[in-house]
Image: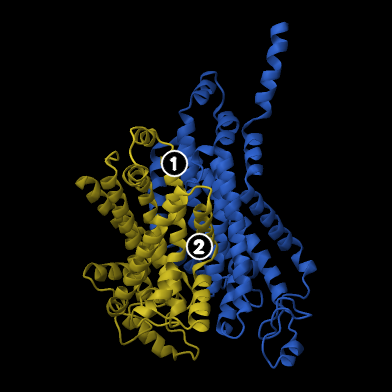
Chain colours: A yellow, B blue
Amino acid sequence: MIKYIVGRLLWIIPVLFVVTILTFILMHSVPGGPWAREKALPPQTVARLNEKFGLNDPIYVQYIRWAGNLLQGNLGPSFKFADRTVNEIVSDGIGTTMQLGLMAFTLAVVLGIPLGIFAALGHNRWPDYLSTAISIIGVAVPSFVLALLLVLFFGVNLKWFPTGGWKGPETWVLPTIALAGFPIAVIARYTRASMLEVTRKDYIRTAQSKGLADQAVVSRHMIRNALIPVVTILGPTLAYLVTGSFIIETVFGIPGIGRYYVTSISQKDYGVLMAMTILYAFAVAFLNLVVDVLYAYIDPRIRYS
Amino acid sequence: MATVEAVRPVIQTTAARGLWSDAFARLRKNRLAMVGLVLVIILLLLAIFGPIFAPYPYQAQDLKAVVANGNRPVHPGDAHHILGTDQIGRDLLSRLMDGARISMSVAIVVQVVVLLIGVPIGALAGWFGGRIDNFLMRFTDVMYAFPDLLFIILLSVAFRETPFGRAMDGLLVVFVAIGLTIWVTVARLVRGQLLALKETEFVEAARAIGVSDRKIVTKHLLPNGIGPVIVAVTLGIPAAILAESTLAYIGIGVKAPRASWGSLIADGQRLIRSDPHLVLFPGIFIAVALISFTFLGDGLRDALDPKLKGKQ
């Protein structure tokens, strides 16, 4: 098992290498540089800036310089925010982004799993229809639309929650729900299907026929076994939360790192863009590993080699 | 003679309920899937014939109506603009109908890209195995780690000023980019299908009697393995529509004055307090499109592979 984990961890390195190289090449093939302004800068200034930040060097030299700095924990300068390094931008925002993602993940699991169990236990009766309706809404309404609707109803009309910002728990509610909407639906659907599958298993019939109370069958045999496959979708769910966060951060004006994701591309802020890329790629790869290991831990039948 | 006579009807009944007719019968019994199918057909008709029946051209401005309304967007229920207008008097229904055209082209173009790349590569990896297979699997690992939206945004920004970037009002590059991020799923699926089918007895039997590789692929592997691919493609459509509208919402892709449902929402959100219809109606259209393809895809999956019911 340890060997497997180490192997997977080492495999993340070449993946990140390829992802960052691809991004680096694509990024530098975008026409226009980071100094493009509405009022064009004098050419001498641009030349001096290019010289200062080494943008005249061949692209592989720039990549090696960037990678070398990265290994020393230095993400380089921001081309847009002259007074801040990328390290500062990331360390200022990453806590907020992780908090938002973690809260949305918790909400998705805490609501999605019971919703799926509830639906399966009331199969083809009202709990099933209610749960299905909720998951259809979750799948059908994109996060940015859900965010705007929440703002409209609970922010503007009912005035229960603020419509934006990130100052204390009451501002956390709407963004968390908006981000969690889709994962709730996916987890609920998956849990329901898994529960229905388990219901038909022989060991459930055995448990019932030896006279075990319904409640014990459900809690001890059905739910425990049904939740094992659910773990496999937690990986994609986490990846969704990671990339979904930047839309939500933009809608609500949350000071995380996600909102830099889009702006750094249009502003060609090379430093910030590369930092976002490697952070997101690492998060996705690492979280998938965690989920796979968790899967083996929960289900003793699974052995990685 | 008598025995042949007696056996024939039995053979006929089994032939009549082959894989496809069986699946179609199951699909027809699935109420949600049929609702999805009807909605998909309506959306397709709207996309093809919408511009002919649209009350106005999508870019036409009825400034008089806006001025008469005190320089505010016309609200739904108006005699001339059923779903209202935006701030500069463009008819919302007409723009939504043009948006249907965009969303349906996403649905089709993206899946064509996915099929063109994913099926051949997956088939090669699955059929030949070995080094090609290894390379494909490593490559898909990289693609999975690549943040999708980052890749799409980078590509569309990189090609923005080229003929390719301007094709189809700036949409083609987005479609291709979305396709490039999701073909790996289909490639892996096809590979898995082939690996499993290659070991089956009927393929072994075909090989033993000297059937050519090409015939085995076209006669045995494709018909048997195509079900899950159809399901994956159908369920990939809502994902592509969602990706396009999300990108349009953050300002990537379709160029003004054309507007996809996502960019209509981006334009409308400034006025959400006073004129929520500008966000609500495009939102409803997106939701209907996503629901209809999801229902249809779920129905197809249950119909083609009853064992998988409700999974994935």
The disc placed on residue A197 is 1
What residue appears at the point 56 percent right and 26 percent down from the top-left corner?
B212
* Pointer 2 residue: A138
Characterize the local packing of mark 2: few (<14), some (14-19) or many (20 or more) Cα atoms within 10 angstroms.
many
Q: Are marks 1 and 2 on the same chain?
A: yes
**Where, quadrant-wise, is the N terminus of chain B in this rendering?**
top right
What residue appears at the point 38 percent right and 64 percent down from the top-left corner?
A107
Chain identity of mark 2: A
Q: Is residue A286 above or below residue B123?
A: below
Whether residue B276 sits left or right of residue A121 in the image: it is right
Q: x%, y% of residue B57?
A: 76, 75
- Tell me, yes or no, whether the two marked residues, 1 and 2, touch with CB atoms within 8 Å: no
Chain identity of mark 1: A
**Residue type beneath disc 1:** Glu
What residue appears at the point 52 percent right and 76 percent down from the top-left corner?
A148
Q: Is residue B18 above or below residue A173?
A: above
Q: Name the residue furthest top.
A: B1
